[in-house]
Amino acid sequence: MAQEEAYSTLMHGIQELTFKGPSVPSELLLNGHHAFPLAVNAEDQVIIAASCYGLGRIVVLGHEAYLQDFPELVKNALGWLQAPSGRATVGVHPSSKAIVGNLSSVDAEVCQFRSDLGVYVADAYSVGPFAEDLVSFLKEGGGLLIAGQAWHWSHTHPQENVQLNFPGNQVCGVAGIYLTERYGKHGCVPIPSNIPFKWSSLALEGAYSTLMHGIQELTFKGPSVPSELLLNGHHAFPLAVNAQDQVIIAASCYGLGRIVVLGHEVYLQDFPDLVKNALGWLQAPSGRAKVGVHPSSKAIVGNLSSVDAEVCQFRSDLGVYVADAYSVDPFAEDLSQSLNEDQKGCLQKMGRDCAKYLTMSAHDCASYSSVLEILTDLVKTGKVPQVCGSCPVRSTEDRLLLEVASGVCKVCPDPGSLLPYIIKDLPALPTVSNAKLCISASTADAKEWISTGLYLSPGMGTDMEFPAQIVGKGWKVQIGCQSDNLKRADVLKRAPVVCECFPVDNNIVQVWNLWGGLIYLVAPPKCHVVGEEIVVQKAVRAPYYKSGETSVPDWVNNIRHAPAPWAELEFENLIISLNSESIRDLDRPDLVAAQWDAVMRGVADLAGKPAKFPRKERFVADVQISAGFMHSGYPIMMHTPSAPDLLKLTNKKDPWGPLHELGHEQQRNVWEFPPHTTEATCNLWSVYISETVLGLPRTKAHPSLQPSKRFARIQNYIKGGRNLKHWSVWVALETYLQLQEQFGWDPFKKVFAAYHDMEGVPQDNKGKMNTYAETFSKVVNRNLTSFFKAWGWPLEAATEEKLSGLPDWSDHPMAQYA
């Protein structure tokens, strides 16, 4: 009733809406009980819809042009949207400011979103940066008018899921309205007095008529006691309901297929007319005439004289398959059609919703306990995939099971009982008891992982005892080093999230991780502790080498054989976490330490920093990472097959990758000009370390530094008009290499050091480029303005004036292209 009243208010005075011209809308997908259509075209596509969420309301138009094309609808919508909050002011995003001229009767202003507004109007493309704020605004009683289409976005983002990632859907989706990639058809749409039917309602009525054609009644009698059927979702509908309002026979659609379910197997023979109708309706989607009958139901074949039927096991070339409910389990997966994109999106959303719901841990709430019980049963019966590098997960269904399994294990009373259902091959590794750790830490401005040399097997828990000096001071325990979140990956080679953190808020902390992992202490920023003892009740020893503490004989004879599958090598300024198999034959970790100590001192040297890092850098080699071949961060992530190369850096033909990522860690915004130099200046460290530490000339350090390739890039850049939009990666690096080849590495060290204490550096690229040109010129005591201008840098007259007293570098490498 409330929806009908809302519909009447929204469509008041509107007889028809004409969708025409170049504005091609998106079809809207409606989900849930609160969303309802306002305009449905001749193709039964919803083009305009409304919904409620929390205390607020939302109206969604399938194209942004409709904000101007349908002023009466917009006026009605604003009135309806304002009602819950009682606030009169309508905010209009700058991208939609053209509609303000039509809002003379409304208190409207063009502005960025503010929570004190009554209604906010925006196109669907602009809401991404503040989507969470809009959702909160809507939930608390605000009104939203969103307009746009998603089909163009889907073409420009072919790898993205429209329902989940299109900016507008991040807001509209919470209210059950999704802009889809499907084009909406043009035409004149009459506006009925009541909410228009969606195609599915009409389709179900037609299906019911077909299935029950010629049947006046069905009599359920005799010894055959049926099961009541439970219907769920928009596609399921009853065919026979008894006097107790129990559904005994029902039908539904799934994907492109159809299904009819009878509450007892004897009804296959008791109701031949219904079976005949059902077979005709079931055959229609595939167009295949052949009906297969499972041997357990072969008695019905005598009633199917008018049908091409055979008794057989299930085959995919059949049009319909008939079986009793007791025989389908061995081939249940074959009977399920693959999900379409909309269904996959809904299933993904369901996984996220389940995970968030479980975090409530409301065990005293009956509904929470009921959902937890259902999800626990799903984990036990759902065949959780054994995800790994050799058994990757691709399907939405398997991803859902992984996500639900992880969430359930965190909150169920007995997670250990679920382990056999989630991880089939649980390793039985030997453990040590009451392992004592002596912890010292002195952190700077960032948190720091402290290695322990201990490991927890999957699903294994332990208690850790902490001294008072650490409890309640921001410390944490972390299980696992694989910190990348893989939720956006299309294929999974491990669970999306495999690290767990536990705050040290008591002197005894219980920790565990479904997926297992190395045990770390995470020290907060700006803390200082010395020699604090921590006791770990039970754990597995891991191969752990630490420079200055581990002797080579101990490593070779004992430590490297520790049973944990993860190992760590900790050096002066670097820690490497990798698969234990990679270090079982490592005889001289001290030599590996020496080469990395030299590399890291070189990194610090070029950066103009002390040789001792305030926090050691980390490499973690994982079976799968969130982006690229490697990526920077804390830790730097890399793929498992690349890990052995870290142990023989001087023997590598191409050590570029790890050095490139270490270079990323040294980049600073004050002398970076993103996006131009993001993948360029980091390579200064690759070149510097290759040449000065590893003895590898730049021509051999990377194929792209061959003289012929460098020359060709310069030529192409000049021919392209020295446009800065083409000044990036190798082209941008060339600018810095030309400076280095003229003045050496020492000026770079001085320039980077100068920036450590520099204040008032501009925030924009133009200002920063002028500052850099001025700084470098003063360090080398030469006027470099003509050089930088030859590369297309936007140097200002003021900068040229400041440097005019220095000797000009007139014979620079770019002078020949003047």
Image (cartoon, rainbow, N blue to C red):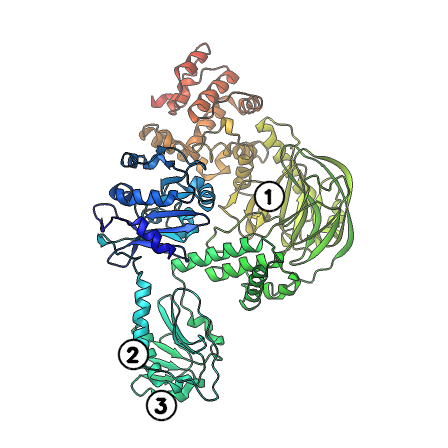
Sequence-wise first label, 2 or 3: 2
Give the labeled residue for mark 2.
213
Q: Can you tell which of label 2 and label 3 is closer to the viewer?
A: 2
The location of residue 86, given as percent across then percent down, is 41, 40
Q: Is residue 213 left or right of residue 561?
A: left
Q: Quadrant of residue 336?
A: bottom left
The label nearer to you, 1 versus 2, is 2
Residue type at mark 3: give it.
Answer: Gly
Comes first in the chain, label 1 or label 3 = 3
- At x 33%, y 68%, the residue is 204
Question: Which quadrant: the N terminus?
Answer: bottom left
Residue situated in front as seen by the camera: 650 or 529:
529
Q: How much space separates mark 1 and mark 3, taking CA atoms?
A: 70 Å
Which x, y percent locates residue 487?
Answer: 50, 51
Q: Amino acid at mark 1?
A: Phe
Q: Pick the residue in front: 384 or 345.
A: 345
Write down the residue under mark 3.
302
Which SS class for mark 2? loop
Is disc 1 placed on a helix, strand or loop? Answer: strand
Kind of residue indicated by mark 2: His
Image x and y of residue 229, in percent? 46, 74
Q: Is residue 206 visible?
A: yes
Residue at the spot 60% in from the left edge and 43% down from the top edge:
619
Disc 1 designates what residue? 619
Sequence order check, earlier mark of 1 and 2? 2
Q: Give the CA distance from mark 2 to mark 3.
A: 21 Å
In this rendered view, identify the residue nearer to me: 387 or 100.
100
Name the mark on residue 222.
none
Mark 1 or mark 3, which is nearer to you? 3
